[in-house]
Amino acid sequence: MDRNVLVEALQREGNLKYSFNADEIASLTKHMSIEVIDEQSTLMSKGEPSDSMVFVVDGLLQVLDGEKQIALEKPRAILGESLFSDEATRVADVQAMEPTTVGRFSLHDFKSFLDKIQSLALKYREYFRAIGRARNEQLVAENYSDNCKYLALIAQNNMKAILMEFCSMHSKKLETLPLIATGTTGSMLYAKTRLSLRKKVASGPLGGDQAVGTLISTKNICGVIFFRDPLSSHPHHADIEALGRLCDVYQIPFATNPQSSEAILDYLLSGKSNQEIIPNHVLEAYVQGQKKVVEAG
């Protein structure tokens, strides 16, 4: 490949153009080697020293963690920015899925660049360090697993005062449980009882009920206390019904008034919620039916 193609690719298509001018990008490419990687060939291997980074000019790369594909990298991508991080070795394999052309920038190239134009070389180093930090933060977020089981506290507007009174009466019990509620309910709860939420969601009409429903499906809810207004109609009635249905599907204790809510608190604090529950044969049959649909497809 003509080096001008590499220069033009980085100047025109890469993200470098947002932080460096054309001459600065051209200076970087003078210290890069151009490589053509055959299909199925390994470009980087997990565990090897992280002593270079590459810029994808054309082609397609896959990032692998063992047999699992964790990313696809197309032209304009930058890989291996751990060259400038504290990571001594690579944490994944990179393999070409088709003939791929890359520009490689090694630790040796950086030292040569540093000798020629120190200020620009250091500017690039900080830029790639920032990219590496951002990517690591993204990976941490993507792999984050919340194992907490929350008690959801929900009340429609006309019932919030009753929920606050209930929480005030049972604050000693509630302070032992991780609580989730809307921001409004959380503020009222803190003002009334000094109890703090562990997690908050949007208000019901804006998706809060659905957010709690999602946490039910991921087994992050141990109980739902939902003081519903029985004498008024509500625009998000379907979301309320769906929340109750999910509690039935996943066998989550669901209370709608102070007396049943007190029973839920006693149940959760007794330790019985950690015991084996009666199997939900309806759910098991549904899951098996879905598997058959997938297999038939």
Image (cartoon, grey):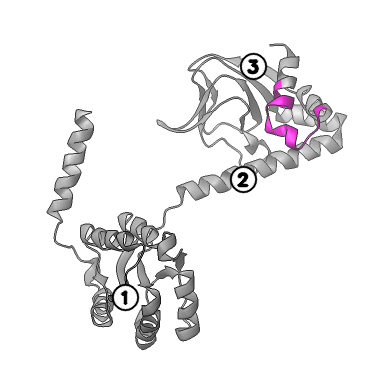
Span shown in magenta: 9-22
Q: Which mark is on residue 134?
A: 2
For marks 1 and 2, give the CA distance: 45 Å
Q: Nearer the viewer, mark 2 or mark 3?
A: 2
**What type of secondary structure mainly makes up the magenta span?**
helix
The first of marks 2 and 3 along the sequence is 3
Residue 49, quarter of picture? top right
Q: Secondary structure at mark 2?
A: helix
**Residue 281 located within the stretch drawn in magenta:** no
Kindly state the secondary structure of the residue where label 1 is placed: loop
Dot 1 amino acid type: Asp
Query: Residues under labels 2 and 3: Cα distance?
Result: 27 Å
Image position, residue 256 (x, y; %): 27, 74
Residue 8 at x, y percent in the picture: 74, 20
Who's the residue at 85% across and 38% down the image?
A: 119
Regarding residue 97, the answer to whether it shows in the image is yes
Give whichever of 253, 80 is nearer the camera: 253
- Please tell me which residue is depicted at 57% across the width and 48% down the height of the picture: 137
Residue highlighted by disc 3: 35
Residue under pointer 1 = 229
Say what amino acid the circle numbered 3 marks: Glu
Report the residue at 28% width, 76% height from top.
231
Image coordinates of residue 261 in percent, x first then y, are 27, 78
